[in-house]
């Protein structure tokens, strides 16, 4: 297992789990994690093996780089249109309670509760079989990827801008359509929960927002049990904070099942494309009646992923949506 970070000015930092002093080393001759992944696929070796072959050089202080906003999203595609942001919901034990409270209007089971129960009963099939498919959503392309430390812009028309602390997987499609997992990061799957609450069919609209990832990419096996912390800061005060759980021990689906139901579609197996898939959460401040404001800072952290992911909330300028005929 290793952790990789992308330096904005160029360069890749690597640290190992035993390096707990905030120090890392630059990977020799590496300019980006994306290029390292491409080279590893081309050579038919693992990303970790390639890094070990290149070797480590100059020591860098990751915490200082993060505080100076010099770390980027760990993996970006050179063409943002070939970077897909997607995710699955209702995958964590307890996640249905939050969603159901937003949409329940009678004693009948909501669609959210129904699909959650389907996951509990069939999301972890035995013997490697395919399980029930989860809820799935499209979030956007690489144009919506926000680096650690940078502002998450909420659209001018948005009714809410709230955090969702999640784990995201990064995947690169090889020349033959084979899916290669690069690694995992912390993610803020930023959403508009007020819009979603109006009507469940507005879920697709509520997800079309930017998202933040990083700062560190975990290369290797994901822990079965992940503990994290989600916090909102307003000025010098902590507005809200709560712990969250992830990893398969705390989920109603296996990661393998979630990956299968995304990459079973041929359109998501086009050579050269980069996919970032978010695996859901059971914890969000909106469920506790909190509505973030411009300038608030979201922080998502977990000992399993090193440095925390921090992003302030901003308001985007209003766009001219008039369509001009040609």
Image: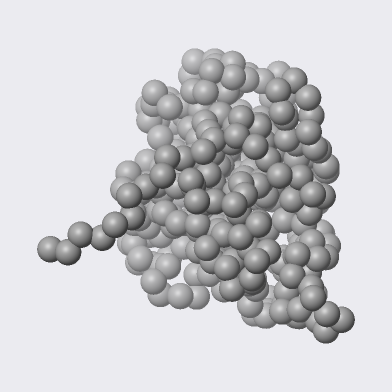
Residue sitting at x 56%, y 42%:
213
Q: Quadrant of the C terminus?
A: bottom left
Q: Position of residue 277 (x, y in %)?
A: 55, 57
Rendered position, 266 above or below 303: below
* Residue 1 visible to an observer of this rendering: no
Residue sitting at x 52%, y 63%:
205
- Residue 36 vs residue 201, the one in the foreground: 201
Whether residue 308 sits left or right of residue 64 in the image: it is right
Q: Position of residue 51 (x, y in %)?
A: 49, 35
Whether residue 115 sits left or right of residue 64 in the image: it is right
Q: Quadrant of the N terminus?
A: top right
Q: In the figure, residue 97 lies in which quadrant?
A: bottom right
Q: Position of residue 258 (x, y in %)?
A: 62, 68
- Residue 208 vs residue 39, the one in the foreground: 208
Q: Position of residue 12 (x, y in %)?
A: 47, 29
Q: In the figure, residue 228 lies in which quadrant?
A: top right
């Amino acid at each position: 297992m290793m952790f990789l970070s992308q330096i904005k000015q160029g360069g890749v930092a690597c640290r190992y789990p035993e390096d707990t002093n905030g120090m890392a080393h630059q990977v020799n001759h590496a300019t980006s994690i994306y290029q390292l992944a491409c080279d590893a696929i081309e050579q038919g070796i693992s990303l970790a093996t390639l890094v070990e072959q290149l070797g480590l050089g100059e020591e860098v202080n990751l915490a200082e780089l993060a505080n100076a906003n010099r770390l980027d999203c760990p993996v970006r595609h050179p063409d943002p249109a070939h970077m897909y942001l997607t995710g699955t919901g209702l995958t964590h034990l307890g996640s249905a309670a939050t969603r159901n409270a937003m949409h329940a209007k009678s004693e009948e089971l909501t669609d959210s509760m129904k699909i959650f129960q389907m996951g509990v009963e069939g999301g972890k099939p035995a013997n490697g079989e395919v399980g029930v498919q989860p809820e799935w959503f499209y979030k956007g392309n690489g144009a919506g990827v926000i680096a650690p430390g940078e502002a998450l812009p909420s659209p001018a028309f948005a009714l809410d801008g709230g955090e969702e602390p999640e784990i995201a997987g990064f995947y690169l499609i090889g020349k033959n359509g084979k899916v290669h997992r690069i690694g995992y990061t912390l993610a803020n799957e930023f959403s508009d929960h007020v819009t979603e609450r109006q009507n469940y069919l507005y879920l697709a609209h509520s997800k079309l927002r930017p998202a933040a990832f990083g700062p560190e990419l975990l290369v290797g096996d994901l822990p079965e049990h992940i503990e994290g912390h989600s916090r909102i800061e307003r000025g010098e005060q902590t507005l809200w904070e709560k712990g969250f759980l992830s990893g398969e021990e705390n989920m109603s689906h296996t990661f393998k099942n979630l990956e299968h139901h995304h990459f079973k579609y041929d359109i998501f197996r086009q050579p050269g494309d980069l996919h970032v898939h978010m695996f859901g959460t059971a914890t969000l401040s909106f469920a506790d009646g909190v509505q973030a404001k411009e300038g608030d800072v979201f922080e998502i952290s977990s000992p399993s992923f090193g440095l925390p992911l921090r992003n302030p909330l901003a308001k985007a300028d209003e766009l001219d949506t008039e369509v001009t005929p040609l």
